[in-house]
Structures are given as structure tokens and as C-alpha cells.
């Protein structure tokens, strides 16, 4: 039994993905892009109706403690597969979706078993552990908003792309970006209620800044009318803070994937632990994420 009223262990999420492939054999394939540092598979699904369609790649859970992100990714998968709304059916008809709910499986498991507030992967560095995988990508690596200190939460790793989890994603994108015509790279995080686009490392504006800003604004408007929540849209550096080595910056810069967004979903109303979102908020937060993604993809489709 799977739902959007509880947070689930990695194994349960993976069992659910497998059950979808059985239930929708002509539409859903489970993808296993290889194992993590500690030998756990990084799994996702491909939802494809027509091999010739353009692709949309979605990662979540790069930060282990942001539990709402994998939950919202599973909600997206479920909407795409079960909705009777024409506009949602069209999203499946017109695009191939590659959705990976937890691209840091070791970290995610660790937050269930040992430390709810763990963020990084579980690689060992002497007595310290963990690389912030969202600082490890080979684009302006460790230039700003990251650290060379393995004890810190924003440790960029010993070198660019050093981590197995990073290498798995890089290889998947490299192998598939042309073949699958991947046009969008979306990353799910929490908490700040933001819809962000490149870059994180510089204030220089990307070439399609105006389009990304406009689509981001439309997405925040969609959320506002759905749940009344205020989200803010802009580039990473102008909304949240400078940071380098993020996956989305890499996908945009290295592979020219033009539609690139990082979503910061909800945190709790007031708490010391902003990553601990009450389970009652999984559904509305996932609905917000879905509305934003739908708005962005439909808007990008209209722009051509
Ligand atoms: O610090 C981060 O990685 C993200 N914020 S979080 O609270 N979820 O940790 C936002 C920054 C995203 N930066 C890049 N993609 N470069
Ligand atoms: Zn995050």
C-alpha cells in the first residue's frame, strides 16, 4: 500500500516503482542506473508512450533529509499514470518522463535508520563522512558556496564528480541526452518555497533568462491560485544563495538542457527543523510541485 499521507522507506518506494511496471507494462519501465557508494541501486522510472517524444528528466532526494522531495516525485509519477484530465494525459502523450525519486539512496536510508537530519552521501573521509552531492558536479566546482572540509554540510568532495552517485547521473544524462532528446532537467528539494533556475555560481544571466523567469513566474502563480502559498522565482544566486557544483547548473551548462529548474518545496510553518514537514502536508506540497512542473512544461511546449 502506497500513498501521500506517509513518508516511505527506500525499499517501499522501489517496490512501488516495480509494481507500476507490472501494472502498466506498455508505459512504465524501471531504470536502474547502478549502485551507490554503499551498493544500493539508484532506481527510477521511464514513462514513455512514444519513443520519438522529447524527454524530461527529474531527480529528487539528492539531499537525504528533504523527505518531501521523493514523496513529491512519486506523486508526479502517480498523476501521470492515473489522471483522467486531458491536460495531464497530454503530458504523457507528448513527453518521455525519466523520474528518479532518490538519487542519494545511502543518505536517504541513513535518515530513516540513524540521523533524520543527514544531508550528504555516506562516503568516508578519515573520521568524517559525506559529500554534498549538489556541490560535486563538474561545473565551476567548489568555486563558491561550498567547502573543502569533509566535516561540513556543504563539502564539495575531493574533486569534481568524485562521487559514484554523481557519476551515475552524469553517465545517464550523457548516454541519453541526445538519444532521448532531453529538454528539461528538474530537481526537487526543500525548504524555501522557491522555483529556481541557473546559475548558482554567478550573477551572469543565462541566455534564456527571460524565458526561464517568465515560466518560473507562471509556475509560482499556479501554486498561488492552487493553495495560496507564496513561492519566489529567480536564478539560484538571486533567490537562495551562491552555490557551485549543483546538478542543474551542470546539466544546463554542459548539456545545454534549456529548461532547468530546482524547486524548493515547503518547510513546516514554524520549526527548528525545517526539513521535517508534517506528513499531512505531503499531499498539498506534492500538488504544488505538480502544478509548477505542469505549468513549466506546458509553457515550454507553447514556446516551442
Ligand atoms: O543548497 C542547496 O543545494 C539547495 N538548497 S537546500 O536547502 N535544498 O540544500 C539550493 C541550491 C541549489 N544550487 C544549485 N543547484 N547550484
Ligand atoms: Zn536540497
Image (cartoon, rainbow, N blue to C red):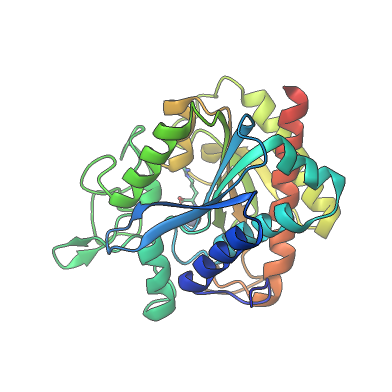
Residue 134 horizontal/vertical position (percent): 40, 48
Quarter of the rendering containing residue 63: bottom left
Q: How many marks?
A: 0
Is there any visible trace of residue 201 in the rendered image?
no
Is there any visible trace of residue 31 in the rendered image?
yes
Apparent side of residue 25 relative to residue 256 in the rendered image (left or right): right
Residue 15 horizontal/vertical position (percent): 52, 69
Residue at 55% x, 73% y is 276
Q: Residue lying farthest left?
A: 126
Q: Residue lying farthest top?
A: 207
Considering only vertical position in the picture, is 11 above or below 302?
below
| Foreground residue among 16 and 240 | 16
Residue 292 horizontal/vertical position (percent): 72, 47
Residue at 71% x, 30% y is 300
Quarter of the rendering containing residue 186: top right
| Foreground residue among 59 and 30 | 30
Considering only vertical position in the picture, is 153 above or below 182?
below
Q: Quadrant of the N terminus?
A: bottom right
Considering only vertical position in the picture, is 294 above or below 23?
above
Apparent side of residue 129 relative to residue 56 in the rendered image (left or right): left
Residue at 44% x, 42% y is 247
Residue 273 horizontal/vertical position (percent): 52, 73
Quarter of the rendering containing residue 282: bottom right
Amino acid at each position: 500500500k502506497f500513498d501521500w499521507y506517509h513518508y516511505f522507506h527506500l525499499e517501499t518506494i522501489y517496490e512501488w516503482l516495480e509494481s507500476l511496471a507490472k501494472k502498466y507494462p506498455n508505459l512504465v519501465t524501471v531504470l536502474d542506473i547502478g549502485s551507490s557508494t554503499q551498493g544500493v541501486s539508484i532506481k527510477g522510472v521511464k514513462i514513455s508512450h512514444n519513443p520519438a517524444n522529447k524527454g524530461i528528466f527529474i531527480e529528487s532526494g539528492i539531499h537525504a533529509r528533504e523527505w518531501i522531495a521523493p514523496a513529491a516525485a512519486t506523486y508526479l509519477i502517480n498523476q501521470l499514470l492515473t489522471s483522467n484530465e486531458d491536460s495531464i494525459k497530454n503530458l504523457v502523450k507528448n513527453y518521455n518522463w525519466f523520474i528518479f525519486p532518490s538519487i542519494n539512496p545511502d543518505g536517504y536510508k541513513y535518515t530513516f535508520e540513524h540521523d533524520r537530519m543527514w544531508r550528504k552521501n555516506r562516503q568516508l573521509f578519515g573520521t568524517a563522512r559525506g559529500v554534498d552531492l549538489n556541490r560535486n558536479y563538474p561545473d565551476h566546482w567548489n568555486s563558491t558556496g561550498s567547502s573543502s572540509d569533509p566535516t561540513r554540510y556543504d563539502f564539495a568532495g575531493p574533486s569534481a564528480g568524485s562521487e559514484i552517485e554523481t557519476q551515475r547521473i552524469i553517465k545517464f544524462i550523457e548516454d541519453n541526452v541526445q538519444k532521448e532528446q532531453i529538454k528539461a532537467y528538474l530537481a526537487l528539494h526543500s525548504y524555501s518555497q522557491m522555483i529556481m533556475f541557473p546559475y548558482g555560481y554567478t550573477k551572469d544571466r543565462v541566455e534564456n533568462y527571460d524565458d526561464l523567469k517568465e515560466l518560473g513566474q507562471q509556475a509560482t502563480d499556479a501554486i498561488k491560485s492552487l493553495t495560496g502559498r507564496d513561492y519566489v522565482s529567480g536564478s539560484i544566486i538571486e533567490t537562495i544563495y551562491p552555490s557551485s557544483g549543483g546538478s542543474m547548473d551542470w546539466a544546463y551548462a554542459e548539456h545545454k538542457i534549456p529548461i532547468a529548474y530546482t524547486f524548493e518545496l515547503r518547510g513546516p510553518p514554524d520549526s527548528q527543523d525545517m526539513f521535517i514537514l508534517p506528513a499531512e502536508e505531503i499531499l498539498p506540497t506534492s500538488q504544488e510541485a505538480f502544478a509548477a512542473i505542469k505549468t513549466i512544461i506546458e509553457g515550454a511546449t507553447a514556446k516551442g
